[in-house]
Image (spheres, grey):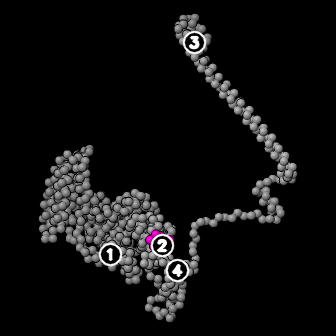
Amino acid sequence: MDVKQLEEGLREGRIEPGRLIDLLEAQQKVLAETESHNRELESRYRELESHYHELKSRNSELEESVQELRKKLQEAFPDRLKESYSVKAEEQRQKARGRKPKKKKRKKPSRRGRIRNADKLRMAQRQEDVYPEGVDRDKCWLSHSRPIWRLIDGRAVLVAYHVYRGPNDTYGKIPGTLGRSEYGLEITITIAFLVYVMGLSLDKVCALLKFFQDLDVRKSQVDSLLNQLGRHWEQEFETLCTLLAHSAMVHADETSWSIRSVWAFLSEKASVILFGVNKSAETLKEILDAATFAGILISDDAAVYARFNNCQKCWAHLLRKAIKLTLLFPKNKDYRELADEMLDIYREAVRIQNDGRMKTAGRMEKVKALEDRVLGICGPAWFAELPRQDGPEDGYRLLCNEMMRLLLEGQLFTFVTAEPVETPRGDMISVPGTNNASEQELRTPAQCRVTGRTNKKERGARRQTIVFSVLESLRKYLDCFTLREVLKEVERWDICGRTYAAYMN
């Protein structure tokens, strides 16, 4: 409202006098605040103006000092200041005077370079001659020398091997080496055991070798040795896959990993652990084809194993589900009875399996009684065809349905009637009712996944698959799983040309 509208309103009586007084008081208050703000701005302006004059005065003093200093320099060097002075100008003046500009010396990198072969041979602590097998030594001549690090009496020793050449291009073969590597096979296998079986990082492996064996090896060398061993054992891994497909029983389980999943297949003949693979029917078919596999598959109730007929589902998984319901709801009578009865049935099944007095027919009669007990505890909920529910009631319904489905498919008590299986060492082992063996095998890869010590590329996953599978499978064939026994077996492969294929009967 402007002044003219206010006057018209007063004349016509539309604005009361009290309202006019309120407007005047509000305007006076706004005017007072504005005046106060103006006074503050004027005070700030005077301060800034005073500060500006001080800076201007100091600038003038500095300019006078610079002029005086320049005058003195001109008196001392009358011709020098007329020239442009810079690094580039100085180089041009030196070039005009016939001088070459000095080049900056590059700082040499601190990393250690390669040591020449001749220097390594001079550093060798032992000398050994290697002649061709079955050739007269008098007819041989020296071909070349190779320095190789070996583990002797628990210490790293540099050995100089002098390889002799015989007639018909026959050469002496250095024992326990891979290709042109400068490290013995025992060092490579030790590294593979520490990295893949024990789950240590490459840095820790280097530190352990330095501390215990006095072997100075770099992280890049460890990685290179593992790559070389993975390539060398490629054929042995393929043989293990064939042995697995012809096994009498196979444990199968998987867990997540840095690259997709890690899948473990354990049998009485082989241990095949696949790193960085998909948990799919295609992957399973490459290792175990349901159409041709004649053994018993021990696994959980995952859908990927549904194509196999001769199966033993893991009782540990089923019991965990029942125990979980009991722990969450201890006052529920149905949950307690289900867990107690399932545990009692499994224990009775194990007792029947271990009873050496029973024949196959007797065990089958006992299995029928166990099946009737399962039908008694899970049948009512299954026959009722309860709808899907929320909360623990649905978990109880699903467990009862799962037990009845496995019962009808004959996958609950396969381990009771199955015959014992013979291992490569001649031992007889029973078919277990749980899949705990494969879960224990995946424990170390799972711990490495949690701590971030897993492969990030397909190449590293493939290398770990080969090396880890070959080492773990050796446990099944050696009476004592030690470095000495592993070396004997691996060296026998190179000499006789027989690997795991000797057990493919």
Query: Could you say which disc has been placed on residue 124 in the image?
Result: 4
Q: Judge whether 322 appears above or below 29 on screen.
A: below
Of callouts 2 and 3, which one flags the residue occurring earlier in the amino acid sequence? Answer: 3
Of the residues tagged 2 and 4, which is closer to the observer? 2
Residue 352 is left or right of residue 224, and the answer is left
Q: CA distance from mark 1 to mark 4?
A: 33 Å
- SS at mark 4? loop
Looking at the picture, how far across and down is residue 359, in whole percent? 14, 71
Whether residue 63 is in magenta: the answer is no
Of callouts 1 and 2, which one flags the residue occurring earlier in the amino acid sequence? Answer: 2
Screen quadrant of the N terminus: top right
- SS at mark 2? loop
Q: Which residue is mark 2?
A: 214
Q: CA distance from mark 1 to mark 2?
A: 26 Å
Of callouts 3 and 4, which one flags the residue occurring earlier in the amino acid sequence? Answer: 3
Q: Which residue is mark 1?
A: 480
Whether residue 215 is in magenta: the answer is yes
Of callouts 1 and 4, which one flags the residue occurring earlier in the amino acid sequence? Answer: 4
**Amino acid on which disc 1 is placed:** Cys
- SS at mark 1? loop
- Callout 1 touching callout 2 (CB < 8 Å): no
Q: CA distance from mark 3 to mark 1?
A: 106 Å
Q: Please name whichever residue, 19 or 30, is drawn nearer the observer in this view of the structure.
A: 30
Q: Which residue is mark 3?
A: 24
Q: Which residues are magenta?
A: 209-216
